[in-house]
Image (cartoon, coloured by chain):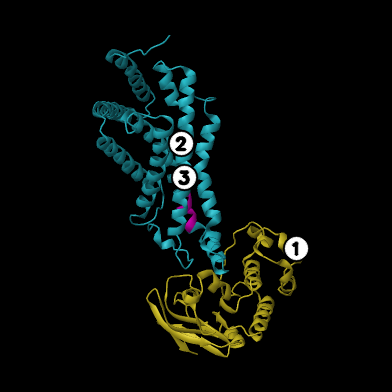
Amino acid sequence: MNGYIRLETLDLVLAALLLFLNGGLSLAFSLGLEKRLLIAGARMVVQLAAVGLVLKALFATVSPWLTGGVALLMILFAGREIVARQERPFAGWWAYGLGVGCMATAAVAVTLFALTAQVQADPWYHPRFALPLLGMVLGNTMTGIALGMDTLTTAIPRERAAVEAQLALGATRFEAMRPLARSAMRSALMPMINAMAATGLVALPGMMTGQILSGVDPIEATKYQLLIMFLIVGGTGLGSVSAVLGGVLRATDERHRLRPERLRKV
Amino acid sequence: MLSIHNLTFQGLGPFAFEVADGECVAIQGASGTGKSLLLRAIADLDPNAGDVRLDGVAREAFTGPQWRRRVGYLATDAGWWRPRVGDHFADWSAVEADVEAFGLPPDCRDWEVARLSTGERQRLALLRMLGGGPKVLLLDEPTSALDEATTHAVEARIERQREAGCPVVWVTHDAAQARRVALRRFTLRDGELQAG
């Protein structure tokens, strides 16, 4: 049992029948989901097909510029997602800038580390290695930063009296904001810690499953999965801690005042 | 001495007044005229502009925290950041006598903050600030939630602080209290301080 089993179009059409089975269930129980199912299913097919074609073209050229361009697009989209997941982000460009800046720095640094030290792709910017690695690190870093920033920015108006009481007694902005920063960092990092603890027991990680299906030895697939998990831990940690610290600085000023008016108006 | 010149914030001012060592100045005025904002601006808790000095030394010579350790601002409903009362005090033994004088039981140190009444919180927040040894007191209605007996106890405690040389700025809604605690009284009206 070695080697890769190619899927034919008919295989996919057969599997897609399951989607229509779901649609039938929705109709039978009048869940009202059939239209949404159809749209989401169609989006999935189109988006994945497009990504497949783009990656195929990129792999054929192995251009550092094209790879970098696609990486930049991924980062910009992820930045929008960071802002969208916060109930009351910083006003103006700060929410986007802070999120993208920290996410990009952390994810790119961690991905470059993997590409040059462990994977040693040739050339190092080969899109076949660079883009999947960046994508996985980016996705998790994005979630961490979004959770951390959302926890921080919702705590600022809620805990305003507690923070200002400390400031009024002569605490520095870092002392006064410490409980807020701590809980923001905790909620940013907890999903990743839980994912590490549960991985392998509940479900096989998607990337490892993919490698096994394509004929890679399970031990080798495990090693890759471990590498990815460590990279994710690094990216999420660096990205969310720096974003939360940046948020603490933006929520206060150099005279150690709290500046809740710098959050988006409700 | 606390001296304030050309103080502006959030479209109010300019304000100018001085409070000598051992002097208490009362500030009255309708709600929403900016009395709390004035105290917050002096304590440098909100963005503001102007020349504020303590014993002739400009505020800019201090960091924000250094300034606020000297110029103590007490909000009407000051916040708490730990679960228990005692966790907010660096040295509980220093306030023990005052706790009793304020009509609070000695074991309130172990109470949960969530359990305190508004009046208990108000008295304990004042003691918490006095424990830090401020040189100036900016008090925002420090007795608004207190009954007559405890109000007098609080007034007596602040009187002692004033006699020790502390300049005091006291915001109050209560005209009788203003007359009791301060010889010089202002009313904040239409964005300016008017005598009386």
What residue is shown with label 1? B107
**Front tag of 1 and 2:** 2
What's the CA distance linking mark 1 and mark 2? 49 Å
Tag 3, which secondary structure?
Answer: helix
Residue segment shown in magenta: A151-156
The quadrant holding residue B107 is: bottom right
**Front tag of 1 and 3:** 3
- Quarter containing the N terminus of chain B: bottom right
Where residue A107 appears, as percent x and y from the top left, is 40, 40
What's the CA distance linking mark 1 and mark 3? 45 Å
What residue is shown with label 2? A232
Compared with A189, B61 (above or below) is below
Measuring 75% from the left and 67% from the top, which residue is drawn there?
B105
- Left or right of A181 on screen, residue A136: left
**Residue flagged by tag 1: what amino acid is it?**
Asp
Tag 2, which secondary structure?
Answer: helix
Where residue A94 appears, as percent x and y from the top left, is 36, 55
Tag 1, which secondary structure?
Answer: helix
Pick whichever, B8 or B112, lies toward us.
B8
Compared with A172, A208 (above or below) is above
What residue is shown with label 3? A238
**Tag 2: Cα neighbours inside 10 Å, few (<14), some, or many (≥20)?**
many
Chain shown cyan: that is A
**Same-chain check, marks 2 and 3:** yes
Compared with B114, B78 (above or below) is below
**Same-chain check, marks 1 and 2:** no
**Residue flagged by tag 3: what amino acid is it?**
Leu
Chain shown yellow: that is B
**Residue flagged by tag 2: what amino acid is it?**
Ile
What's the CA distance linking mark 2 and mark 3? 10 Å
The quadrant holding residue B32 is: bottom left
